[in-house]
Every structure is written in C-alpha cells, then in structure tokens.
Image (tube, rainbow, N blue to C red):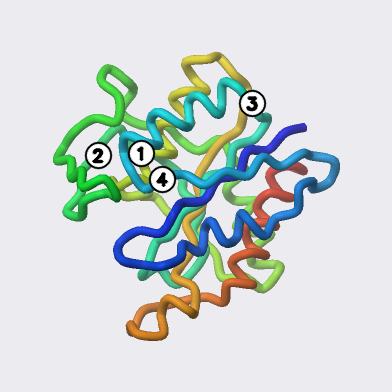
Amino acid sequence: MKVLVTGFEPFGGESINPSWEAVKALPDEIDGAVLIKRQLPVTFKGVREILPKLIVEERPDVVILTGQAGGRPNITVERVAINVMDSTMADNEGFKPEDEPVFEGAPVAYFSTLPIKAIVGTLRSNGIPAGISNTAGTYVCNAAMFTALHTIALEGMKTKAGFIHVPFSHAQALDKPRPSMAQETINRAVEVAVRTSIKT
C-alpha cells in the first residue's frame, strides 16, 4: 500500500507551516504502507499542476492532504471541497482569484472519501481535540482537495482522498491571541489520521 501525505509551505507572513512540520515528522512506513511525503506551494496554480502529476505518477491508495487553518481550535477533517477559488488574501504568487472555478466544467463539489468519522473518533479517543468541518474554505487548501478528488475521478482510480486542517502551533501563537496546539500534538494527529485511513 502507498499513502501520499502532503503539507503546505508557510504563507501569510508565517515562518513555518505546522502541516508540513507534521508531515516531515512522519515515519517512512506505517503498518506496512509506504509514505510519500511532499510539500505543496501555497499557490492556486501550483497545486493544480503538481497534485495531478503526483497522483497519476505515484498511483497511491490513499491521499491525505493537510494544511493550516489559523484560528481553528482543533484538528478539523474536511467533508467537502467545492469548485470555487475566491480569496481576499493573495496566494504566495500574488494571485487573488474572485469567484473562479478550480476547473472549468468540473462538478460543483466532491466529498472526501477518507473515513472522516473514524478519523475524528480515533483522534478524540487519543485525547486530541478534533471535529468534522463542512467547509474547507475557498483558498488554496480547498483547491488542493478539489484537485486531488477531481484527478482521481478523471483517472477512474479507487484512491481514497481528503483533507485535514490543523491549527496554529504554539510557536506561531506567541505574538497573537489565537487558538493553538502543540506541534507534537499536531504531529501525532496526522499520524493517527494516516493509521486510521490505512486500517479503515
């Protein structure tokens, strides 16, 4: 079995992105499954170019995308990605789309095919605050989730895929009154999500 796990580069003036820190900390193999770990750019163009190539070349059985949702207090497993790019903040290339589709002519939305309730349940049973989110937003994280699921659909693959948002790490919240979580807990949460997705 092969699992593709991605995190994002820093954005919005941050020097780190806790999603990529968590992905980097993962072992190379979990329960016999080989992990392919990749960092994605925080650009609408980048994720739409890189993810389809990665998925088609690697043919993973599971794709777990992770990203930072600063301001959220817990680990949030996304239920759905929508075919919209709309942002008040420019991406890392300065692009700020308004009401644009991720892909012209694609479906309006895709639901996660990860075992989202099992992931949340397992996280909570491990003492990690977690919940299901019904919006991945309309920024690059949503575009990445939509791109992955759209690619899998177009290729007729049986790959399971979805997205998990993590909060700010404590290091990021030192100078801002925002919810945060220890990086070690975020790391553990991503590993639990991978293990649960492999088993379920």
Seen in the picture, residue 58 relative to 77 is either above or below; the reply is above
Local crowd size for mark 1, using a 10 Å CA cut-off: few (<14), some (14–19), many (≥20): many
Instruction: Work out which quarter of the rendered image holds the C terminus and state it.
Output: top right
- Regarding mark 3 in the picture, which secondary structure is present there? helix
Q: Which residue is mark 1?
A: 143
Q: Are marks 1 and 4 in contact (CB under 8 Å)?
A: no
1 or 4: mark nearer the eye: 4
Q: Which residue is mark 4?
A: 41
Q: Are marks 3 and 2 in contact (CB under 8 Å)?
A: no
Instruction: Work out which quarter of the rendered image holds the N terminus and state it.
Output: top right
- Cα separation between marks 1 and 4: 12 Å
Give the left or right position of residue 143, taking residue 188 as reference: left
Q: Nearer the viewer, residue 29 or 153?
A: 29
Local crowd size for mark 4, using a 10 Å CA cut-off: few (<14), some (14–19), many (≥20): some
Q: Which residue is mark 2?
A: 85
As shown in the figure, which amino acid type bears the numbered disc 3?
A: Glu
- Regarding mark 4 in the picture, which secondary structure is present there? loop
Local crowd size for mark 3, using a 10 Å CA cut-off: few (<14), some (14–19), many (≥20): few
Among the two numbered marks 3 and 1 on one chain, the one whose residue lies closer to the N terminus: 3
- Regarding mark 2 in the picture, which secondary structure is present there? loop
As shown in the figure, which amino acid type bears the numbered disc 4?
A: Pro
Picture residue at 46% right of the left edge, 54% below the top: 67
